[in-house]
Amino acid sequence: FQGTPLLMQLFLAYFGLALLGLEVSAWTAAALALTLYTSAYLVEIWRGCVEAVPRGQWEAARSLALSFGEQLRHVILPQAGRLAIAPTVGFLVQVIKGTALASVIGFIELTKAGSMIANASFKPFLVFGCVALLYFALCFPVSLFAQHLEGKLHGR
C-alpha cells in the first residue's frame, strides 16, 4: 500500500469491494483506505527510526544482559520515539489534508462540503477561505503539540 496512490486505494476500497459483492458505504471505504495507507507509511517511518538507533546502543543493551523485549522497552524505543516524532506528525498532517481525496468516492468531507456551499452561495473565496482556516485549525495544533513534545524530549 505504500507505493500506490491514495486515490487508487480509495477507488479499490469503494469500487473494488463492490465488484466482489461487498457493498460498503463511502465512509467505510474511506476509513479502510486511509487506515491501510497510513499504516503502511507509519510502519516504515517507525521501522526506520528503530534502525536509526546507533548499533552501539543495541550492543550496550545486550551487554547489560537485557532480554530482547527489555532492550526494546528500556533502550531502543525511547530513542526511536524521539526520532519518530517529526516524521510521524508530518505524515499525519499530510493524511489530514489527503482526506479531501475521499470526496471522489462520494464521501462528503471538508473540501467537498465547502464546494457544495460555494456552489449554492456563489461566494467561493469566502467559503474556501473558511475551509482553509478549518484545515489550519486541524493541522496547526497537531504541529504545535509535536513541537512541544520534541522540546520536552530533547530537554529544551
Image: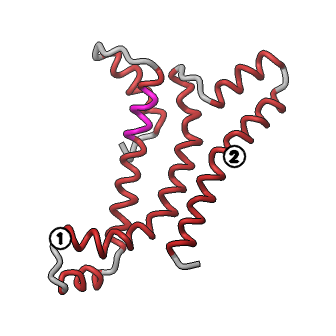
- Give the magenta part as a residue range: 29-36
Q: Does the magenta-highlighted stretch encompass residue 33?
A: yes
**Label 1: how many residues lie within 10 Å, few (<14), some (14-19) or many (20+)?**
few
Dots 2 and 1: beta carbons under 8 Å?
A: no
Report the residue marked by disc 1: 68
| Spot occupied by residue 52 in the image (x, y as percentages of width and height) | 36, 73
Report the residue marked by disc 2: 136
- Classify residue 64 as left or right of residue 34: left
Q: Which quarter of the figure has residue 146?
A: bottom right
| Spot occupied by residue 127 in the image (x, y as percentages of width and height) | 79, 29
- Classify residue 146 as left or right of residue 49: right
Q: Earlier in the sequence, mark 2 or mark 1?
A: 1
Q: Amino acid at mark 1?
A: Phe
State how many labels appear. Answer: 2
SS class of the residue under badge 1?
helix
- Classify residue 94 as left or right of residue 68: right
Q: Amino acid at mark 2?
A: Phe
Q: Does the magenta-highlighted stretch encompass residue 91?
A: no
Quarter holding the C terminus?
bottom right
Residue at x 77%, y 23% (from the top left corner): 118
Majority secondary structure of magenta residues: helix
Quarter holding the N terminus?
top left
**Label 2: how many residues lie within 10 Å, few (<14), some (14-19) or many (20+)?**
some
Q: Nearer the viewer, mark 2 or mark 1?
A: 1
Residue at x 37%, y 46% (from the top left corner): 39
| Spot occupied by residue 61 in the image (x, y as percentages of width and height) | 23, 81
Q: How is the image coloured?
A: secondary structure
| Spot occupied by residue 141 in the image (x, y as percentages of width and height) | 64, 52
